[in-house]
Amino acid sequence: MYVDLDMIFAQIKKDDRLKETSDLLLKSEEKQYTSALTLVELEIVLKREVSDFLSKETAGLFREKFPRILIVGFDKKILEKSLELRQKYDLGIFDSVHAATALRYDKRIASTDAVFERVLGLKIIQKQ
């Protein structure tokens, strides 16, 4: 299952409202993966919402906290699918990359972001 940024950030941000949901999803025995661009998005969010210092440690922090989550590459096919999804479903840049990557691998995404409900063929995994 593809792990969206909201599930990752909930494990880092103190007192995040999605922490329990994230705990349940990330404790799953399923194979978990995310895009290399998720780390870029995480770095941006950490800088904006937590600290510039922590944002500079994104790669190490990710490896330490999420050793089970495989980081998959971003390639031309995912880029093209991402652009198609942005236009078709009016998704944001990162959301379109998350959706395109999930569609490429197993069509499943662990997220609480309702924007993914618009994407045909994508199954949203939520534990609440």
Image: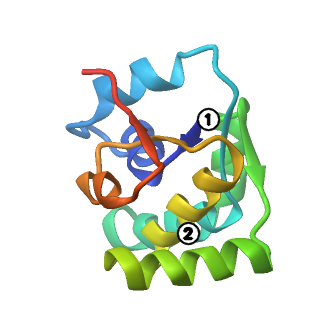
Query: Sequence-wise, which precedes: disc 2 or disc 1?
Result: 1
- Determine the image quadrant of residue 123: top left
Q: Name the residue type under label 1.
A: Lys
Residue that appears at 39% across and 59% down: 119
In this rendered view, identify the residue nearer to me: 58 or 34.
Answer: 34
Q: Secondary structure at mark 1?
A: helix
**Image spot of residue 99 (x, y percent):** 51, 60
Residue that appears at 72% across and 51% down: 60
- Determine the image quadrant of residue 35: bottom right
Mark 2, residues whose alpha carbon is within 10 Å: few (<14), some, or many (≥20)? many
Does residue 55 lie above or below 80 as drawn?
A: above
Does residue 14 lie above or below 26 as drawn?
A: below
Residue that appears at 63% across and 14% down: 29
Residue that appears at 58% across and 64% down: 100
Whether residue 52 is visible: no
Q: Secondary structure at mark 2?
A: helix
Q: Is residue 73 left or right of residue 21?
A: right
Q: Is residue 27 left or right of residue 73?
A: left
Mark 1, residues whose alpha carbon is within 10 Å: few (<14), some, or many (≥20)? few
| Residue ID for mark 2 | 97
Q: CA distance from mark 2 to mark 1?
A: 22 Å
In this rendered view, identify the residue nearer to me: 126 or 87.
Answer: 87
Does residue 36 lie above or below 4 as drawn?
A: below
Quarter placement of the N terminus: top right
How many numbered markers are drawn?
2
Whether residue 44 is visible: yes
**Mark number, residue 112:** none
**Image spot of residue 90 (x, y percent):** 31, 79
**Image spot of residue 106 (x, y percent):** 65, 40
User: Disc 2 vs disc 1: which is toward the camera?
Assistant: 2
| Residue ID for mark 1 | 65
